[in-house]
Image (cartoon, rainbow, N blue to C red):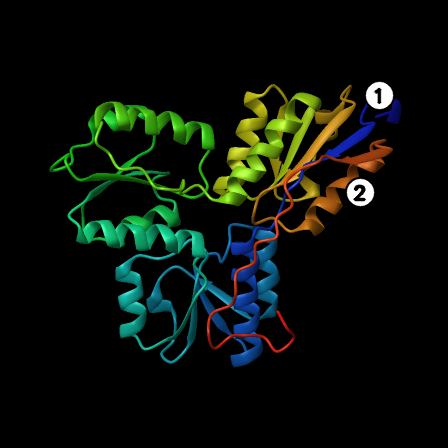
Amino acid sequence: MKANMGVKEILLAEPRGFCAGVDRAIDIVEAAIAKFGRPIYVRHEIVHNTYVVNDLKTKGAIFIEELSDVPPGATLVFSAHGVSKAVQAEAEARGFTIFDATCPLVTKVHVEVAKLHKEGYEFIMIGHKGHPEVEGTMGQLPNGIHLVEDSDDVLKVQPKQTELLAVVTQTTLSVDDAAEILLAVKKRFPKVREPKQQDICYATQNRQDAVKLMSPQVDVLVVVGSPTSSNSNRLRELGSRLGADSYMIDSADELQNEWFEGKHRVGLTAGASAPEVLVQDVITRLRALGATSIRKLDGVTETIKFPLPKGLKLDDGH
């Protein structure tokens, strides 16, 4: 492909890549390895990113789904997505040393569910069936949480009562889709209680806002993220919706030259679990395809940081 036929400019979304919850989760695994030695067991992928998981494997993390695969006396980390009460109880019963890397913004939803449940509430949860965060949140209670994935599901749910009904959501949903489903919930259950602050987290919101700003300005949008990453998938969908040819890739190796034929301006972003090194690899590939200018779009500067759990504070001031 001749350089003049394709990419000229790269637009970088701001913010992109790691959020505070992902940073903390990775730090927890690394700090546990440093403190207790290898191996450290992690239930589920610590965050949904292939590169991060493989990197931690080389450092001494072993990723498992079943707690029966963890030897007695081992150190176990719960992933950033959170776990059900049953998983928590089983891990404690098996006597592991446990560090919980659940994102504090997911824990906030768990706490709200427990509090309202005590007051007699049932719940409608907006989320994706089978996603570990949804399984963790729904597993905070033995029953009384009804999952809806779209507006059609809202018409089918059968709560036992509608006087005390609250809505919660997965933290990584499409902001627009969730708003549409919430409207359907409110239409069917006018008395439903909404979260004071939306459950969709700041990082999901900010990365989607950045893609909304960028997509109309580019011919192609490249989202760096793994197939299992909910928030990365939402960024790609959003770009498509706004008219950009949108692709999600795990690494620069997946880029196809034909995506860029006759396309001058490429937008680049990364999901909340994708490291910046992968973005830089994509930039290198796009430069090889002829990109000569890189422009960072204005966006929100994220300063939020979450502390590590007690017993894992690093000595180097992290």
The location of residue 301, given as percent across then percent down, is: 65, 45
Q: Real-space Cα distance between discs 1 and 2?
A: 18 Å
Residue 22 image-quadrant placement: bottom right
Q: Amino acid at mark 2?
A: Thr
Q: Is residue 52 above or below residue 259?
A: below
Q: Nearer the viewer, residue 110 or 41?
A: 110
In-image side of 93 versus 3 (left or right):
left
The location of residue 95, given as percent across then percent down, is: 32, 77
Query: Reading the chain from its start, which is encountered first: label 1 or label 2?
Result: 1
Q: Nearer the viewer, residue 286 or 304?
A: 304
Quadrant placement of the C terminus: bottom right
The location of residue 209, given as percent across then percent down, is: 57, 33
Tag on residue 257? none
Residue for point 53% across, 28% down: 237
**Mark 1 surroundings: few (<14), some (14-19) or many (≥20) residues within 10 A:** some
In-image side of 260 versus 44 (left or right):
right
Q: Is residue 70 above or below residue 268?
A: below
Residue 76 image-quadrant placement: bottom left
Residue for point 33% across, 25% down: 183
Quadrant placement of the N terminus: top right
In-image side of 153 versus 196 (left or right):
left
Tag on residue 5? 1
Question: Considering the numbered disc 2 on the image, is that residue within a helix, a strand or a loop?
Answer: helix
Q: Amino acid at mark 1?
A: Met
Question: Considering the numbered disc 1 on the image, is that residue within a helix, a strand or a loop?
Answer: helix
Q: Is residue 94 above or below residue 23?
A: below
Q: Are marks 1 and 2 in contact (CB under 8 Å)?
A: no
Which residue is denoted by mark 2 in the rendering? 284
The location of residue 176, given as percent across then percent down, is: 45, 28
Q: Is residue 303 visible?
A: yes
Residue for point 17% across, 50% down: 119
Residue 313 image-quadrant placement: bottom right
